[in-house]
């Protein structure tokens, strides 16, 4: 579903993303967006910047651009692309220099930084006027509100699911996972599959910031206070979440020494038929299908209790520059890219990242594809999205939390001490002006 510069790699690069200050972003606001607002033939120019189309879907984007311009002959869309590892540096430079594109793509990790800076236009009136909410689930659309204002429209997504090996479940005499499974069900199954021996492991889930924030919601906790000003993860729910993630290591899943720093260790373990359950994303569907592994499927991830469903949905958003000189035309372009059936159809046909606004008819077409048979879970996850903490200093906070989780795994600290230390380091970073 995804290429090397899309949602999957976005998480790999999260620590390399430049941190933006409000002052830097607003510095160039007096100049307006991009460099030209009118083409020589009088058409209004909409400058659009994206990372998810490069390099695998540039032709697909060109197809959409041509179709849109045919229906909107007064608009000239001009596309800028960059690989993910360069994208935010280039975007930061253009925003700070007063040449921001009219519409640009953001991932959920960086959304709050740009919203907080004043670089994004308020979309509330446009969303209401064009009845945009009818295209999305509440949790999907609300992911791109900041302090009560809509600043982005969901444009694409991938979902983290529980992949499982049916053959290993059958050999262990364990019923296959269902959408109402809990952590206890997963743990019992993992232990029985691990007991098969022969280098077989029961479970694999990275102990990382991303997994912690999701699992914390599954456990009934919060990362931040309701007003977003204080850390809240150093709680009994937080401690239980750390134990859930770290206790797997060396018991039902491999140790860090066994993995040896190999980045695709979990992928190979699953595709080689040596892993019962794997917490990973829908972007791995093609790789697993092409690996030769026969009896596998996916299901929504378990939660601590049946009444606390919370799913990791990695969304990108399209935002409108607050300094756009062609805001109405730019809105028409971003509205088309995020809500059109034509766009959703092309995304399915080309294995591009899916549109959250996919119609029921197109969704049924997608779900009919196999493997996996359970791919309906991809869209089902949108009903209960685990909200991603809106952090201006996201990269630094992510790094702090992940380091403390690693320390627990290595046995150099306890879950309680790890969360206490992380909270002390993260609290000052909740100030948007923090260095």
Image (cartoon, helix red, strand yellow):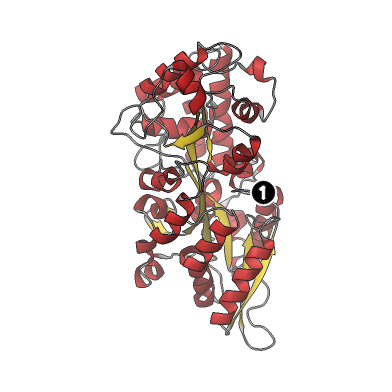
Quadrant in the picture for residue 136: bottom left
Quadrant in the picture for residue 101: bottom right
Quadrant in the picture for residue 206: top right
Instruction: Indicate whether 300 appears above or below 50.
Output: above
Q: Position of residue 162 (x, y in %)?
A: 47, 33
Q: Is residue 302 left or right of residue 336?
A: left
Q: What count of labels does the image hold?
A: 1
Tell me the residue at 58%/69% (across/down): 102
Label 1 SS? loop
Instruction: Indicate whether 177 appears above or below 144.
Output: above
Q: Which residue, as the protein is rendered here, is positioned at the far bottom?
A: 41
Q: Position of residue 299 (x, y in %)?
A: 43, 36
Q: Position of residue 17 (x, y in %)?
A: 64, 44
Few, some or many C-alpha atoms within 10 Å of disc 1 (few <14, some 14-19, many ≥20)? many
Q: Is residue 97 visible?
A: no
Instruction: Indicate whether 103 appears above or below 380.
Output: below
Q: Is residue 121 left or right of residue 149?
A: right
Q: Is residue 55 left or right of residue 326?
A: right
Location of the C terminus by quadrant is top right
Residue position for label 1: 5
Q: Is residue 273 left or right of residue 300?
A: right
Tell me the residue at 68%/62% (across/down): 58
Q: Position of residue 291 (x, y in %)?
A: 65, 35
Tell me the residue at 40%/25% (across/down): 238
Q: Nearer the viewer, residue 232 or 381?
A: 381
Q: Is residue 201 visible?
A: yes
């Amino acid at each position: 579903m995804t290429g090397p510069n899309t949602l999957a790699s976005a998480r790999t690069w999260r620590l390399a993303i430049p941190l933006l200050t409000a002052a830097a972003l607003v510095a160039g606001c007096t100049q307006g967006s991009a460099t030209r607002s009118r083409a020589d033939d009088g058409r209004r120019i909409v400058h659009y910047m994206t990372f998810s189309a490069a390099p695998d879907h540039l032709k697909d984007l060109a197809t959409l651009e041509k179709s849109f311009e045919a229906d909107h002959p007064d608009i000239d869309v001009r596309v800028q692309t960059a690989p993910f590892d360069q994208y935010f540096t280039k975007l930061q430079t253009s925003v700070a220099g007063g040449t921001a594109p009219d519409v640009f793509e953001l991932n959920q990790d960086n959304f709050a930084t740009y919203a907080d800076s004043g670089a994004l236009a308020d979309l509330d009136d446009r969303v209401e006027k064009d009845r945009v909410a009818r295209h999305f689930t509440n949790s999907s659309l609300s992911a791109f509100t900041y302090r009560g204002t809509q600043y982005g429209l969901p444009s694409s997504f991938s979902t983290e699911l529980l992949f499982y090996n049916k053959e290993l479940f059958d050999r262990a005499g364990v019923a296959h996972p269902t959408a109402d499974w809990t952590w206890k069900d997963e743990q019992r199954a993992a232990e029985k599959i691990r007991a098969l021996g022969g280098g077989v492991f029961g479970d694999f889930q990275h102990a990382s910031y991303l997994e912690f924030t999701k699992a914390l919601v599954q456990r009934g906790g919060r990362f931040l206070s309701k007003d977003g000003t204080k850390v809240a993860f150093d709680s009994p729910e937080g401690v239980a979440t750390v134990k859930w993630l770290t206790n797997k290591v060396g018991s039902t899943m491999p140790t860090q020494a066994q993995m040896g720093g190999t980045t695709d260790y979990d992928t190979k373990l699953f595709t080689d038929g040596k892993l019962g359950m794997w917490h990973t994303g829908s972007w791995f569907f093609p790789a697993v299908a092409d690996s030769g592994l026969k009896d596998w499927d996916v299901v929504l991830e378990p939660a601590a209790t049946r009444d606390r469903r919370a799913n990791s949905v990695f969304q990108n958003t399209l935002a409108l520059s607050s300094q756009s000189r062609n805001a109405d035309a730019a809105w028409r372009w971003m509205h088309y890219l995020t809500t059109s059936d034509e766009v959703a159809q092309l995304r399915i046909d080309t294995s591009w990242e899916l549109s959250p606004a996919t119609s029921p008819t197109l969704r049924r077409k997608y779900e009919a594809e196999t493997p996996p048979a359970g791919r309906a879970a991809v869209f089902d996850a949108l009903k209960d999205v685990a909200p991603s903490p809106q952090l201006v200093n996201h990269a630094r906070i992510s790094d702090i939390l992940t380091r403390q989780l690693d320390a627990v795994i290595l046995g150099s600290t306890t879950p309680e001490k790890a969360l206490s230390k992380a909270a002390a380091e993260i609290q000052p970073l909740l100030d948007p002006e923090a260095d």
